[in-house]
């Protein structure tokens, strides 16, 4: 028997998306923490993006020729 209940479809997709977010968020935080210095990780609040993604925006992370130190 085929069920045609739109609210059940919306609810089940919402739960699936939330479940995926719960699994992926700690992995994202671990990746970002791996790209930061120890001081940056322990600073409250920790930045939500990696240093490599913001290299062009924050020149203090760059050396003389625009490379990471």
Image (cartoon, rainbow, N blue to C red):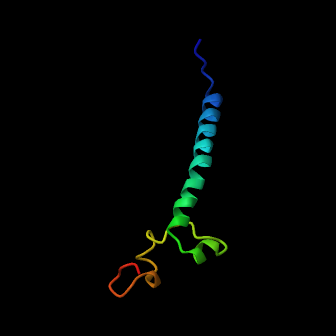
User: What residue sits 56% from the left and 50% below the top?
Assistant: 24
Of all residues shown, which one is farthest toward the bottom? 64
Numbered label tally = 0
Which of the 4 quarters of the picture holds residue 53?
Answer: bottom left
For the C terminus, the quadrant is bottom left
Of all residues shown, which one is farthest toward the front? 38
Image vertical order of residue 3 relative to residue 35, above or below: above
Of all residues shown, which one is farthest toward the left? 65
The percent coordinates of residue 11 (x first, y second) are 65, 34
The percent coordinates of residue 30 (x first, y second) are 56, 60
The percent coordinates of residue 49 (x first, y second) are 52, 67
User: What residue sits 52% from the left and 60% below the top?
Assistant: 31
User: What residue sits 60% from the left and 77% below the top?
Assistant: 39
For the N terminus, the quadrant is top right
> Closer to the camera, 15 or 22?
22
Q: Relative to 14, is 62 on the left or the right? A: left
Which of the 4 quarters of the picture holds residue 61?
Answer: bottom left
Image vertical order of residue 37 relative to residue 26, above or below: below
Q: Relative to 58, is 15 on the left or the right? A: right
Which of the 4 quarters of the picture holds residue 64?
Answer: bottom left
The percent coordinates of residue 4 (x first, y second) are 60, 21
Image vertical order of residue 26 relative to residue 58, above or below: above
Of all residues shown, which one is farthest toward the right? 44
User: What residue sits 58% from the left and 15% below the top?
Assistant: 2
């Amino acid at each position: 028997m085929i069920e045609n209940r739109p609210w059940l479809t919306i609810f089940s997709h919402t739960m699936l998306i939330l479940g995926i977010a719960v699994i992926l968020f700690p992995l994202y935080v671990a990746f970002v923490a791996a790209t930061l210095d120890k001081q940056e990780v322990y600073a409250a609040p920790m930045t939500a993006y990696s240093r490599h993604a913001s290299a062009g925006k924050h020149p203090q992370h760059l050396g003389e020729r625009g490379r990471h130190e």
